[in-house]
């Protein structure tokens, strides 16, 4: 029932692509890490956050990328838990003036691990 190291490694590779795409503002690459029906929820600076994948990708497309901003960027995998064809990754993304803590739900679809839900909270330290 528990995952294999191969599944955790595959999810890590997807997360590497996810971080790279966010950093560079590459919407096509970022889109490749998500299932088309993904929904995003959470809070940003204390305000509720709810978007469809299309809305989220449009926002990424229309903002200055963290890379082009010249500000520090860091994507970090905290943990990955896999059971059969589902998984959850806890990650942290520091960009602009945000410190996002994220829970990303994954599902193995057609032998690919894709993000099917993204929950975020901006944490002020």
Image (cartoon, rainbow, N blue to C red):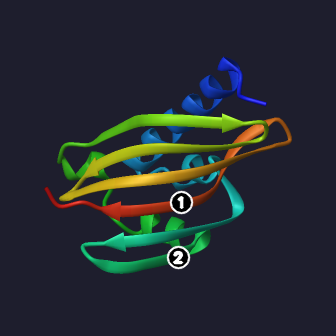
Quarter of the image for residue 86 reads top right
Instruction: Residue at 24% x, 60% y: name it.
Output: 123
Q: Is residue 45 left or right of residue 37?
A: left
Look at mark 1 in the image and give the residue it sits on.
Answer: 118
Horizontal and vertical percent position of residue 121 = 35, 63
What is the secondary structure assignment of the residue under circle 2?
strand
Label 1 crowd bin: few (<14), some (14–19), many (20+), radius 10 Å: many
Along the polypeptide, which appears first: circle 2 or circle 1? 2
Look at mark 2 in the image and give the residue it sits on.
Answer: 51
Instruction: Residue at 54% x, 51% y: name it.
Output: 104
Circles 2 and 1, Cβ within 8 Å, touching? The answer is no
Horizontal and vertical percent position of residue 13 = 57, 29
Instruction: Residue at 42% x, 43% y: name it.
Output: 91
Give residue 31's mark. none
Q: Is residue 108 left or right of residue 74?
A: right
What is the secondary structure assignment of the residue under circle 1?
strand
Residue 13 higher or lower than 39, as above or below: above
**Quadrant location of the C terminus?**
bottom left
Instruction: Residue at 49% x, 33% y: name it.
Output: 16
| Viewer-nearest residue: 74 or 1 | 1
């Amino acid at each position: 029932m528990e995952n294999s190291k191969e599944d955790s490694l595959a999810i890590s590779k997807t997360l590497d692509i996810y971080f790279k795409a966010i950093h560079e503002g590459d919407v096509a690459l970022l889109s490749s890490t998500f299932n088309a029906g993904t929904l995003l929820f959470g809070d940003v600076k204390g305000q509720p956050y709810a978007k469809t994948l299309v809305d989220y990708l449009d926002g990424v497309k229309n903002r200055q990328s963290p890379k082009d901003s010249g500000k520090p960027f860091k994507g970090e995998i905290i943990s990955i838990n896999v059971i059969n064809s589902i998984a959850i990754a806890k990650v942290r993304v520091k960009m602009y003036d945000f410190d996002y803590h994220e829970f990303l739900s994954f599902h193995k679809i057609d032998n690919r691990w894709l993000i099917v839900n993204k929950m975020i909270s901006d944490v002020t330290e």
